[in-house]
Amino acid sequence: MHNILCLIEKAMTFSEDTAGAFLVVPSDSPDDIAALRDIKKKQALREKYGIEDKMVLPFEPVPIIEIPGYGNLSAPLVCDELKIQSQNDREKLAEAKEKVYLKGFYEGIMLVEGYKGQKVQDVKKPIQKIMVEKGQALIYMEPEKQVMSRSSDECVVALCDQWYLDYGDKEWKQQAMECLKPLETFCDETRKNFEATLDWLQEHACSRTYGLGTRLPWDQQWLIESLSDSTIYMAYYTVAHFLQGGVLNGQGPSPLGIKPEQMTREVWDFIFFKSSPFPKTDIPKEHLQRLRREFEYWYPVDARVSGKDLVPNHLSYYLYNHVAMWPNDSGKWPQAVRANGHLLLNSEKMSKSTGNFLTLSEAITKFSADGMRMALADAGDTVEDANFVEAMADAGILRLYTWVDWVKEMIANQNNLRTGPADTFNDRVFASDMNAGIIKTEQHYQRMMYKEALKSGFFEFQVTTFSITSDKTPNCVCTGSLMKALWPVAGPVDEVLMRSSQYVMETAHDLRIRLKAYLAPPKSKKGDVKPTAKPSHCTIYVAKTYPSWQHSALSLLGKHYKSNKGALPDNKVIAMELGALPELKKYMKRVMPFVAMIKENLEKNGARVLDLELEFDERAVLLENLVYLTNSLELDQIDVVFASEADDKIKEDCCPGKPFSVFRSEPGVAVSLLNPQPSNGLFTTTIDIRQGDSRDSIIRRLSKVNRFIKDLSKVKLMRFEDPVLGPRRVPILGREEQGKLPISDKASFSISLADRKVLMTDNGLSVDIGDTLVYLVQ
């Protein structure tokens, strides 16, 4: 049932499917503006109803409400956005009303004289009262839609004498609002629905003459209907196990020997209210005190989970009745209400008649319990209708299978994993990522956001795991049985370390883009395409500080940000202030794009964007990840130097967090790397030895050419004792190291391009290695 109240405008229109006239609000009603537009553009329709042009053509909607985001003509705006052509676009009109009506009621501001500046929801009752008093309106009640009984009969509403709960009582309503303020609702929409309900809720018919329910103590003819009667039954749950044991129908023996007729009102008062005296009863005092202690331990209700359709009635009564029971003890008031939507199956409403139906037992048989858990968690978290998609359940089973398969592979390969301290850069980042994931997932579980928990606790967890293991052999951490595992306790989270890891990923991405641009073949004046040789080396320049013009701009932005409590002025103001700085005059074309970039990054990453220095050592981070970057770009060597050592152009283009890279190709002398081991699929490979190479750099270059080499630590590099005749002798099976000498990790190589020679210095001895080296894989 609802009260009908129309805000009247001096605008009149006609609907195509009705013959009567009615007053409308085309400024804020999508249906009405669609009808007004129809009658204005369809002459035949006007002629059909005898409407003269002067009655409608001169008129436009009159603004009466200002709605944030929609302006003062919300209905025309939304109809234009949704491209509504006429009153026949029913689905689009319904969508338009959904957008406009709720926002208009809660956030709309009146523009009409006498109520200007007030919220729509605040003026509804005063306008209603004035119109009724002047005889301009009357209040009547009707169902919001047709109501059908379970016997398929149309219901007729009759206003009869009965008992009401006066939820409009000012003191009671105010207490309910006080209960709502600290209540955790998990989403704004649920809170707004509660606020709207408490605002309009007045008298509620709480009784009926038949059915299930508790009889009114003072009028045994009436029963309290279930929506009103079942609002504090959770208080009974706290002691039910002492009164009826494990028998749900209440017929079982009481563990404390208490009979139903002994539970008088005075007994319940003693259990529920600390101030109530001990009642006159034959129940032993220690039993009643035990019941009271149990209630005090379990109450208040930590979280009530229910359907979103019950917020306008049952759940609101739930708040009202708790504050009525414990008006002076807010510690007994509900702590949280989690409202959820309905459940769809494959994006459609479940219905036996259409066959779109799946029972829980059928679903478990079809998808398994774990597949069901994943699909139900993925179905949705908010008050929007959850959507159980069978394809997601199938995909979930495959993901679980893949995950289990990966775990088995890791267990089988655990002897090949690293041991010892997990203190590399990747190890430290991995630990922080895992700890952050544990904390985030636990928070999602606490807020009952199961889709988000699935995302952070399963999908992101796998991404973190796979990204680490694919880059480097993981460290072995032995664990016990999963059956005995508790929820993991998160260790410290190093936010700076995690951001430095993100910096490495972004730098690698930027380097790949720059390398692609470097390799793009330039065109000559004749139009010929000249291929660019793949570079072997890269120099990455990093800046300790910003260039002077960027430093000045950032300093100004930081000053405004602090003084304006996290806000920045308009670009016009910033441009004017920056333009007044003499040191920035020749940079003004670059300053404002830089400011725009900083503003964008500020929204994404917060105030640290305005820092004049990075929070981590940029060069040290790159050096610690040099092997990853070198392998990722398939280069031989990357050097990291400070921009202060570069020319002026690089200094201008390089700033903290945004390194500048220069690629180049270093000359080398070709050397054959021979593998004499039989039946291993490792053949002779030719690579270039370059100035300053070490044993490890040669092995890394070898692994790029020969993909069969996975673990570089197992490669042994050797040279021939006789660099001329050694390579010509046939190797002896089982004596692959005969006539060869190992190359230590301290060896360094130099080249002579003129005579194509390679010299190696190792332990103070300088030798000519010839044109062949030997590598063994242990």
Image (cartoon, grey):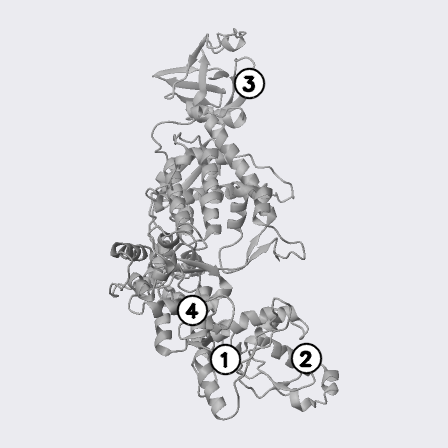
Dot 1 or dot 2: first in sequence order is 2
Question: Are there few (<14), some (14-19), or many (20+) residues within 10 Å of tag 1?
Answer: many
The spot of residue 693 in percent (x, y) is 43, 25
Residue denoted by label 3: 684
Q: Give the left or right position of residue 731, taking residue 612 as reference.
A: right
Q: Is residue 654 visible?
A: no
Mark 3 or 2: in front is 2
Compared with 618, 759 (above or below) is above
Spatial CA distance of label 1 from label 2 is: 23 Å
Q: Nearer the viewer, residue 618 or 528?
A: 618
Mark 4 or 2: in front is 4
Q: Give the left or right position of residue 477, taking residue 50 as reference.
A: left
Q: Is residue 406 visible?
A: yes
Q: Secondary structure at mark 1?
A: strand
Dot 1 or dot 4: first in sequence order is 1
Q: Nearer the viewer, residue 474 or 589?
A: 474
The spot of residue 273 in percent (x, y) is 29, 64
Is the residue under label 2 in contact with that under label 1 (CB below 8 Å)? no
Question: Are there few (<14), some (14-19), or many (20+) residues within 10 Å of tag 4?
Answer: many
Residue denoted by label 2: 38
Spatial CA distance of label 1 from label 4 is: 32 Å
Q: Secondary structure at mark 3?
A: loop
Q: Nearer the viewer, residue 599 or 38?
A: 38
For badge 4, the amino acid type reads Tyr
Residue denoted by label 1: 65
Dot 4 or dot 3: first in sequence order is 4
